[in-house]
Amino acid sequence: MGAGFNKLFLEMAGKPILIHTLEVFERDPGCSGMILSVKLEEKVEIEKILEQFGITKVKALVEGGAERQQSVAACIRAHQAEGIVLVHDAARPFIHQEVIDKLVEEASEHGAAIAGVQVKDTIKYAPIGIVEETVDRSKLWAIQTPQAFRYELLKEASDKAEADGFLGTDESMIVERLGYPVRIVESTYDNVKMTTKEDLLFGEVLLKRRQ
């Protein structure tokens, strides 16, 4: 996929990847609204796409930051919410409704829940290219999105991370550092992030199977 081109505009089965993802939450009766983190120069194009495909639950388009954490923080500040909020990669269009429902359930009860799948490959610890240890993969999870949190907990974690100058790789990481337990909800291996041409081909196959 070409450098400088937003992969979310690439089409699968006649629709941009972005729309396939948004339609999942558009159909979700538990979703009251969506806030999208976007590049300022793409805002007009995204507004056109949303209108073209009848996406009605998007409440705001917020200019993102240089890092994912900054983009999420901007969305948190843009719209105060009650209850549970989900953070999701727009490049993951194949999340299942059952997983979303379970995430909301777990986050409602415990405060934080994230989607993930157990690691299937053998993992080696080799910091300088020489194997020091074979890690027990039965204890390892590959984390996906959505990640679900009580709004006030995610805001507290986001504000604390910003104040401390801490940059995490996902939202659960900034919640963890507050000492809150984060539950894992088992997701599916087809909840892939569309980042390569091979992913796009795989996505086309998945869409055909679901039709």
Image: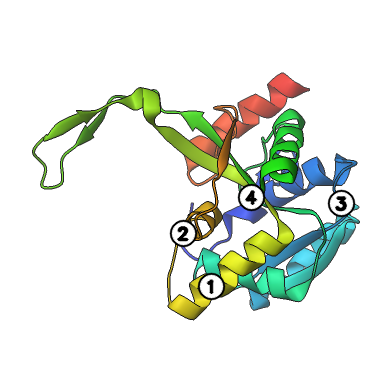
Label annotation for residue 160: 1
Residue 62 relative to residue 169: left or right: right
Q: Position of residue 154 (x, y in %)?
A: 64, 61
Give me the C-alpha separation between circle 1 and circle 2: 9 Å
Which image quarter holds the C terminus? top right
Residue 24 relative to residue 159: left or right: right
Name the element at disc 1.
helix
Q: Which residue is mark 3?
A: 53
- Give the image quarter of residue 151: bottom right
Give me the C-alpha separation between circle 3 and circle 1: 38 Å
Residue neighbourhood size for the residue with mark 3, other residues' Cα within 10 Å, grouped as few (<14), some (14–19), many (≥20): few
Q: Is residue 177 above or below residue 181?
A: below
Label annotation for residue 10: 4
Amino acid tagged 1: Lys
Residue neighbourhood size for the residue with mark 4, other residues' Cα within 10 Å, grouped as few (<14), some (14–19), many (≥20): some
Q: Position of residue 89 (x, y in %)?
A: 61, 51
Amino acid tagged 4: Leu
Q: Residue at the spot x=74%, y=22% of the render?
A: 210
Residue neighbourhood size for the residue with mark 2, other residues' Cα within 10 Å, grouped as few (<14), some (14–19), many (≥20): some
Q: Nearer the viewer, residue 115 or 45?
A: 115
- Lower position in the chain sequence, tag 1 or tag 2: 1
Q: Which residue is mark 2?
A: 177
Name the element at disc 3.
loop
